[in-house]
Image (cartoon, grey):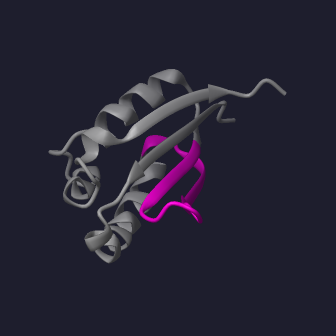
Amino acid sequence: MASIHVFIEYKVKLSSKKLYEVKMKDVLENLPDYEVEDIEWFEAADQEGLYVEMFKVPTMSHYYALKERRKSPSHAIFGQLDQVVDGGVEKLHCWAFVAKI
């Protein structure tokens, strides 16, 4: 059972929103290859272009490995977002949490 809750937050260039949503389909399809579970994907209702991904991974090692790949512009799948994220994938804000209750 996955125990680390991961949150990733970033801004998408407004001019690239449609392209981003197409590329995100590849990202979402590939996340399970990294033992990601319970994937959720949100667009902020009050901040245009702000997106959040939430999911679970089994260990902190999984989190660190996935974070490194998600922030790599040269990654074959995740790097596709580099051109559509404001500031590139290096600007992805990633956090890992452990549930307290």
Q: Is residue 36 above or below residue 67?
A: below
**Quadrant holding the N terminus:** top right
Tally of marks: 0
Q: Is residue 64 above or below residue 42?
A: above
Magenta segment boundaries in residue numbering = 34-55
Q: Residue furthest right?
A: 101
Q: Residue at x 66, y 30 (%)?
A: 3
Using residue 4 as the reference point, say whether residue 89 is left or right of it. Answer: left
Residue 31 colored in magenta in the image: no
Q: Quadrant of residue 64?
A: top left
Percent across and percent down for residue 54 are 57, 47
Q: Residue furthest bottom?
A: 18
Q: Residue at x 27, y 57 (%)?
A: 81
Q: Nearer the viewer, residue 43 or 32?
A: 43
**Quadrant holding the C terminus:** top right
Q: Nearer the viewer, residue 93 or 15?
A: 15
Q: Residue at x 74, y 28 (%)?
A: 99
Q: Nearer the viewer, residue 54 or 56?
A: 54
Q: Nearer the viewer, residue 13 or 35?
A: 13
Percent across and percent down for residue 45 are 59, 65
Q: Residue at x 79, y 23 (%)?
A: 100
Q: Quadrant of residue 12?
A: bottom left
Percent across and percent down for residue 93 are 41, 37
Percent across and percent down for residue 37 are 59, 47
Residue 42 colored in magenta in the image: yes
Q: Residue furthest left?
A: 74
Q: Is residue 75 above or below residue 49?
A: above
Using residue 65 as the reference point, say whether residue 56 is left or right of it. Answer: right
